[in-house]
Amino acid sequence: MLRPLDRHSWPDRPRTARRGRDRRGRGPRGPLALAAIPRDRSRADRFDDLVLDAVEHLELRWRAELAEVELAVEEVPPEQEIDILDLDPVPLARVEEGARNVRLIVHRWPIELRARNGLELAALVHDVVVEQVADLLGIEPEAVDPDYGLDDD
């Protein structure tokens, strides 16, 4: 017969760390993936890495022009940015020009929803960043990066 344990039924001995196996005899449990393995990173972290890779690729050629540009990633665009009369009402990124700085903001969810796999996601992030930099500089995307649009099938 089982009876509920209360505080008074515990033996008066100091608690020690459990050594050896767990209570079912399977051994100590550990993390499922090591910290150095990419699977341990969240989708948002992996997306941030894709954006940084795209910007680093462009910085090799446009370092002086991008020196004052801040980079940010938002989950979704703000409501006032969505234009229901536009053919594609959800913007993938935007550029905010302030008095002192320029901020390039990439929206994660709209981009992730358009990509079917990781390679397509990386290509789409690259193209979106190139388009925003081209708008910022007032030139064509192909002039910003000759690889623009080549990964589209």
Image: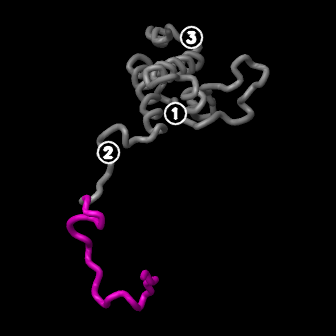
**Residue under pointer 3:** 139
Q: Residue at x 29, y 42 (%)?
A: 36
Q: Which of the two discs, 1 and 3, labels the residue nearer the N terminus?
A: 1
Pointers 1 and 3 in contact (C-beta within 8 Å) = no
**Numbered badge on residue 33:** 2
Q: Residue at x 43, y 81 (%)?
A: 2
Q: Quadrant of the N terminus?
A: bottom left
Question: Where 148 falls versus 69 (above or below)?
Answer: above
Q: Magenta stretch?
A: 1-26
Q: Is residue 8 found inside the magenta-colored segment of the image?
A: yes
Q: Nearer the viewer, residue 116 or 91?
A: 116
Q: Which of the two discs, 2 and 1, labels the residue nearer the N terminus?
A: 2
**Gap in angstroms between the C-alphas marked 1 and 3:** 19 Å
| Label 3: few (<14), some (14–19) or many (≥20) C-alpha neighbours in 10 Å | few
Give the x, y percent position of residue 130. 51, 18
**Numbered badge on residue 85:** none
Give the x, y percent position of residue 43. 47, 37
Give the x, y percent position of residue 109. 58, 32
Residue type at mark 2 is Ala
**Residue under pointer 1:** 70
Give the x, y percent position of residue 113. 57, 27
Q: Is residue 105 visible?
A: no
Pointers 2 and 3 in contact (C-beta within 8 Å) = no
Q: Is residue 31 visible?
A: yes
**Gap in angstroms between the C-alphas marked 2 and 3:** 45 Å
Residue type at mark 1 is Glu
Q: Residue at x 47, y 33 (%)?
A: 47
Label 1 residue SS: strand
Label 3 residue SS: loop
Q: Residue at x 59, y 14 (%)?
A: 138
Residue type at mark 3 is Ile
